[in-house]
Amino acid sequence: MGKRWAVGALLALSVIWVVSAAPLADARGRAAGGEAEEPVSLPESPAEARAEAQGGLLLEEIAEDTGSLTELRAVEAADVPEPGRDAARWALYRELLARKEDGSFDGEEPVSRAEAVQALYRLSGILVRVDPCPYADVPEAAQDAVAWADSVGVSGGVAEGRFAPDAPVTRSQLAVMLRRFAAWRGEDVESRTAVSWDGEAVPAYAEEALNWVTDRGLYAGMTDHGLYPDLPVSRLQLACVLARLQAPRDPLTGELSLPGSGDAGRSLERHEALNQAVAEAARRHGAVGVQVAVVEGGVLTDAYHYGWAVRGSVPMTGAHKLRTASLSKVVVGLCAALLEEEGVVDYDADIGEYWGVKTWRPVTIRSMLNHTSTLLNSENIAWDTRSVRGQLANASGYGRGTPGDLRYWSYNNHAFGILGQTLELAAGKYLDDVLEERVLGPLGADCSFAAGELEAPELVTPLYRTSSLGRSAASLRSVRRWSSPGATGRQFAGGFTSSALDLGKLTALLAGDGCFEGVRLMDAGTVAKMECGDALPGGTRQALPMRLRFGAYGRERLYYHTGSAYGAYNLLSYDPDTGDGVVVLTMGADGRKDAYGIYAVCGEISRAVYEAIA
């Protein structure tokens, strides 16, 4: 392990002392009683003794092993971008993180709780068994590290007898671990700065720790565009954080940065001009309210809002929730992609397999995503599972043509309702839960197919058709979770409710090929499957379920989807070559279309943004 066992044994006495002093804490920094626990701090004499030992033998050993920065840089980490590569090399050399089976560093992969604790354990230099591991779910390879972390109070379990070693470590959890680790080493863990994170709910158990890591600069480059306290930490991010934590002790780490850190984005630089462009387009088309989110290089960088959330009384803010109309289909497509990635569904299997019925024609998830299912599209068909089973099994439930054949392409709202039901039946859970577990939770996004289930339903806006009410906020909020997964498909074609900012987070995930803020939440291949498509008349290509258009708004290629309902006119788009994207949600506008067949109010705003950030 690059450490002398003799040194570890020498330091074991301090560990034994800490075991008797440290309270048992869970992964969220709470003691057994449930209250937030202060970081473990050691009396002066053991801390000083340990610091003296580490400052002597351990640093001497580091110099012997690494020799110089030149030797450190000889460690191979070719798959890591140049910013941050030194941190990856350092983490590999110190054996804080191990290479993947294919020999790569894989810096975007989320770090598990066990890996985070193992890295701190190795950084501690105390590589002797402390106590038996108290958690039955920890694999043998991580038991020493977890037992050490538990005994000294760096990290405990998530529940009695459970450590959840494979769960990703979040930014909040890591901050608590780091602060407790620093306290255990006898370092100053007082934060001099109270950090304010606009619009983000910082967990109470991690507030002091997050202030401290920010004050110390440990999260530099990770929080340039938001804290995202529940977002997992990537391997490269952990390497940089630990290198900064160790930098005063290990001069070989130097100044380390993360890819993309420090770039505020062109939208912020031109915010006032773009804010005026949004307002002018909104006024020109008579919009009552508008929200806009901007993505640059796969990163959500900026947002705008205009007009009213409730006409004449409540100004629009970035936090208000709007019905996204057919942009909901992109979210259903995202759910399908996530479940396909997990092996829960097969894009090309007959959906009768999930419904327990023999379909009259073979219908697949792929054919529903690309509007070639040939399922009858009618508002008169019921959405309950019994009626859908009947439609799937009978000739009367279909139009003409062959499912999957683009010659029979027909935009199909009803098929998307059935698609949402199919996914829920296959997963045995609501699509809201699929999204929450995989993306909405980590991204801190409050969105739902059932507006009444939002964390803040009071922020749902009414919809306006020019000067009149299209649908009341109370009506939208009346939609609650249905009786069981798959019980209805009514919301999947157009009922997703979100702010542009939160929908922008999902757009950033797609524009970033499955990465968000440097952390991989989806496989790049999964996003590539969503982007696969075939040519349609008019020069576009039908993907799953977005369209690909060439030469729109100054971009060579744009994936996009439009949506309209009850006076809402919306657009989601992103450039797959640059990772830039724009989400525009409006209500009350005139609904005119531009030369691309896109609602002009959305197109004008999108063009202004794309030109400004090019």
Image: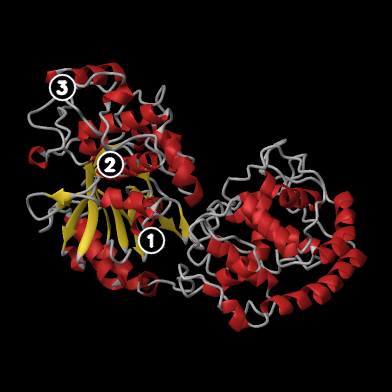
- Residue 599, label in figure: none
**Image spot of residue 365 (x, y percent):** 26, 35
In-image side of 515 versus 23 (left or right):
left
- Regarding residue 78, the answer to whether it shows in the image is yes
- Separation of residues labelled 2 and 1 (CA atoms): 23 Å
Residue in view at x 80 percent, y 56 percent = 128
Is disc 1 surrounded by few (<14), some (14 to 19) or many (20+) residues within 10 Å?
many
Label whose residue precedes the other's in the sequence (1 or 3): 1
Q: Secondary structure at mark 1?
A: strand
Q: Nearer the viewer, residue 120 or 78?
A: 78
Residue flagged by tag 2: what amino acid is it?
A: Lys
- Separation of residues labelled 1 and 3 (CA atoms): 43 Å
- Quadrant of the snapshot with the C terminus: bottom left
According to the image, label 2 marks what residue? 329
Residue in view at x 31 percent, y 67 percent = 578
Rendered image quadrant of residue 253: bottom right
In the rendered view, tell whether residue 185 sits above or below residue 229: below
According to the image, label 1 marks what residue? 303
In the rendered view, tell whether residue 524 sits above or below residue 359: below
In-image side of 219 versus 547 (left or right):
right
- Residue 397, label in figure: 3
Residue flagged by tag 3: what amino acid is it?
A: Gly
**Image spot of residue 162 (x, y percent):** 68, 38
**Image spot of residue 391 (x, y percent):** 20, 20
Residue in view at x 18 percent, y 39 percent = 371
Label whose residue precedes the other's in the sequence (2 or 1): 1
